[in-house]
Amino acid sequence: MLEPKHRRISLSRQCGLLGLNRSTVYYQPRPGDELNERLMRLIDEQYLRTPFYGVEQMRLHLKRLLHPEGIEINAKRVRRLMRAQLTGRGLRRHASALSRLNCTSSSPAMRR
């Protein structure tokens, strides 16, 4: 466990001992984007109907749905959202690094 106000060991040294970057300590996750949530719901609905759609076909489907609203969507975004849904992972970053912050062991082998 990190102690930012520790008297003897600096935060930088604590991070070094745990094998973490200091940026991980200061990381603040962004709140969920409403458009991303809507897109994920639309992708999920369409995927249940047509599981054979790839990224490009899904992008074209979303383009047809969202074009009247003036929303543009690219393949890179669709790929990221589909991967997040199909692998069961959320859209958060640093999850593995953040879990190591609560580790009580100083041995690298015990943190895995």
Image: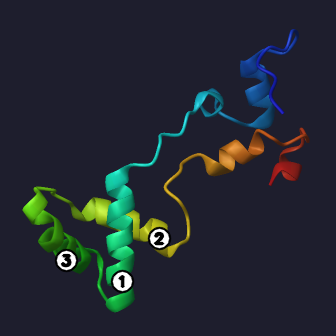
* Label 1 secondary element: helix
Identified by mark 1, the residue type is Tyr
Identified by mark 2, the residue type is Gln
User: What residue is disc 2 on?
Assistant: 85
Identified by mark 3, the residue type is His
* Mark found first going from the N terminus, 3 or 2: 3
Query: Which of the image's four quarters has the N terminus?
Result: top right
Q: Which residue is rendered at x = 60% and y = 27% of the image?
A: 26
* Mark found first going from the N terminus, 2 or 1: 1
Circles 2, 1 touching at the beta carbon (< 8 Å): yes
Is residue 107 at all visible to an observer of this figure?
yes
Spot the residue most to the top: 7
* Mark found first going from the N terminus, 1 or 3: 1
Q: Which residue is rendered at x = 80% and y = 28% of the image?
A: 2
Query: Which of the image's four quarters has the C terminus?
Result: bottom right
Checking the image for residue 61, the label placed there is: 3
> Which percent across, then down, holds residue 106?
89, 38
Cα distance in 3D space between marks 3 and 2: 17 Å
Q: Is residue 18 left or right of residue 61?
A: right
